[in-house]
Image (tube, rainbow, N blue to C red):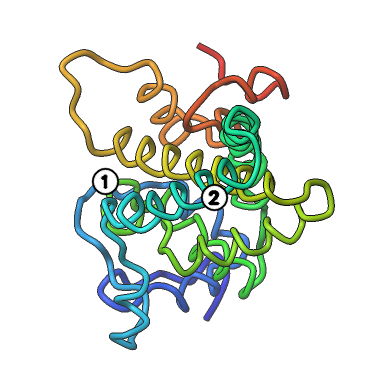
């Protein structure tokens, strides 16, 4: 049974159920379940473990790589130029973050595989926004994105400054994932504007407010949510 009559069994692995929702998927995935528990996605234990990543893995894994990339760029070129290019990489990632979130992670789908892929990529985060183990990107997946980005950027910038650009982009990614985790799970003594902004994206209007680390690109592209 599929489509509007299909009901997801939350006591069973979810990943390969949600595709059967058909056109009802979009409404279902945007009705959040606010609980800290991590639902099971896959029957296979190894695959299931691969979907869960503590937030601290991101800086622990990537910060040494950022240091190596930027320092090697500075060693083989100009320290000032490497610093400027790395800073540009951080800013570039904020635009990448916005574009990926808006155009890739919020694509509309009604097909079985479209629903399934969307749920695994991002829909799960909207359905279970407080799942603390499925908020940051697993290093193997972020490494794949980084390799792809490296080869694209090779068309526009050469070494030694390509390394600085990638290092800056990775630093921007670390800032993004740690900020995203903080917005969901930290309890600041005073309300943070960015936290309220992001919670609005989850619980009020999902078609606006795609920026996580900054509202700048939402302002540029006209996707700021109404007050």
Q: Earlier in the sequence, mark 1 or mark 2?
A: 1
Q: Residue furthest bottom?
A: 44
Q: Residue at x 37, y 82 (%)?
A: 47
Q: Position of residue 123 (x, y in %)?
A: 49, 56
Residue 162 in percent (x, y) is at 68, 48
Between marks 1 and 2 in the image, the one whose residue lies nearer the viewer = 2
Structural distance between the alpha carbons of marks 1 and 2? 44 Å
Snapshot quadrant of residue 94? top right
Name the residue located 60 percent from the left edge and 60 percent from the top edge: 145
Identify the image quadrant of residue 11.
bottom left
Residue 116 in the image: state x and y as whole percent: 55, 70
Q: Which residue is mark 2?
A: 72
Q: Is residue 188 left or right of residue 221?
A: left
* Rendered image: mark on residue 86: none
Secondary structure category for the residue under label 2: helix
Residue on which the image places disc 1 = 34
Residue at 60% x, 27% y: name it.
Answer: 80
SS category of the residue bearing label 1: loop
Label 2 environment density (alpha carbons within 10 Å; few <14, some 14–19, many ≥20): some
When the figure is inspected, residue 3 is found, relative to residue 77, above or below; the finding is: below
Q: Residue at x 50, y 55 (%)?
A: 122
């Amino acid at each position: 049974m599929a489509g509007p009559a299909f009901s997801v069994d939350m006591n069973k692995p979810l990943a390969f159920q949600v595709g059967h929702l058909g056109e009802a998927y979009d409404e279902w995935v945007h009705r959040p379940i606010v609980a800290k528990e991590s639902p099971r996605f896959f029957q296979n234990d190894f695959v299931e473990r691969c979907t869960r990543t503590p937030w601290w893995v991101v800086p622990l894994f990537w910060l040494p790589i950022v240091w190596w990339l930027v320092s090697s760029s500075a060693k083989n070129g100009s320290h000032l130029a490497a610093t400027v290019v790395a800073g540009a990489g951080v800013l570039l990632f904020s635009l990448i973050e916005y574009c990926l979130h808006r155009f890739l992670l919020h694509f509309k789908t009604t097909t079985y595989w479209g629903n399934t892929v969307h749920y695994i990529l991002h829909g799960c985060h909207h359905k279970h926004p407080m799942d603390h183990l499925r908020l940051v990107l697993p290093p193997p997946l972020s490494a794949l994105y980084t390799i792809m980005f490296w080869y694209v950027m090779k068309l526009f910038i050469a070494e030694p400054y390509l390394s600085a650009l990638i290092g800056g982009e990775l630093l921007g990614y670390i800032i993004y994932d740690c900020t995203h985790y903080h917005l969901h799970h930290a309890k600041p003594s005073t309300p943070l504007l960015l936290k309220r902004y992001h919670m609005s994206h989850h619980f009020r209007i999902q078609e606006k407010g795609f920026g996580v680390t900054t509202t700048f690109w939402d302002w540029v592209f006209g996707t700021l949510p109404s007050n």
